[in-house]
């Protein structure tokens, strides 16, 4: 069951995830352009054939967005 947001939290409409080929490069480039990141790129999951990395940011209307990258071995 869904409940009301906690005090100080937004109900939000959801998160849009953008897949990028090179997450560290995208993070560096967008940071230099003034994008407000919530955190640094971080490992989310180690899967059998790749790692999943993400970073979250806010747009001009304070919506939460995410960049993600699948890093494969080899």
Image: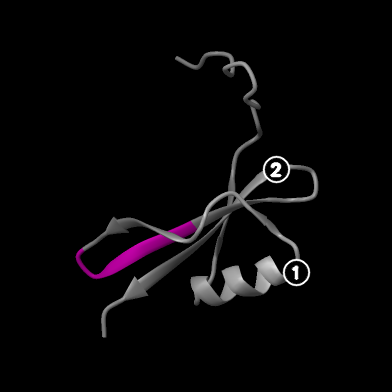
**SS at circle 2:** loop
* Residue 44 percent coordinates (x, y): 36, 54
Question: Number of numbered discs present?
Answer: 2
Q: Is residue 21 inside the magenta stretch?
A: no
Tell me, for residue 3, which label it has, or none: none
Q: Disc 2 marks which residue? A: 63
For this orientation, the residue located farthest to the left is 48
Q: Disc 1 marks which residue? A: 33
Looking at the image, tell me whether mark 1 or mark 2 is earlier in sequence order: 1
Q: Which residues are magenta?
A: 48-54
In the picture, measured across the screen, residue 34 lies left or right of residue 11, that is: right
Q: Work out whether residue 2 or residue 43 is closer to the camera in this orientation and state it.
A: 43
* Residue 68 percent coordinates (x, y): 49, 62
Spatial CA distance of label 1 from label 2 is 18 Å
The residue located at (39%, 68%) in the rendering is 70
**SS at circle 1:** loop
For this orientation, the residue located farthest to the bottom is 74
The residue located at (24%, 61%) in the rendering is 47
Callout 2: few (<14), some (14-19), or many (20+) C-alpha neighbours within 10 Å? some
Main secondary structure of the magenta stretch: strand
In the picture, measured across the screen, residue 27 lies left or right of residue 35, that is: left
* Residue 12 percent coordinates (x, y): 65, 32
Q: In this rendering, which labeled residue sits more in front, label 1 or label 2?
A: 1
* Residue 72 percent coordinates (x, y): 31, 76
Callout 1: few (<14), some (14-19), or many (20+) C-alpha neighbours within 10 Å? few
The quarter holding residue 27 reads: bottom right
Answer above or below: position of 69 versus 73: above
């Amino acid at each position: 069951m869904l409940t009301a947001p906690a005090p100080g939290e937004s109900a939000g409409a959801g998160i849009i995830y953008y897949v990028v080929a090179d997450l560290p490069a995208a993070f560096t480039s967008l940071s230099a352009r003034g994008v407000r990141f919530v955190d640094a790129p971080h490992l989310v999951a180690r899967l059998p054939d790749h790692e999943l990395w993400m970073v979250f940011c806010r747009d001009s209307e304070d919506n939460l967005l995410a960049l993600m990258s699948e890093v494969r071995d080899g």
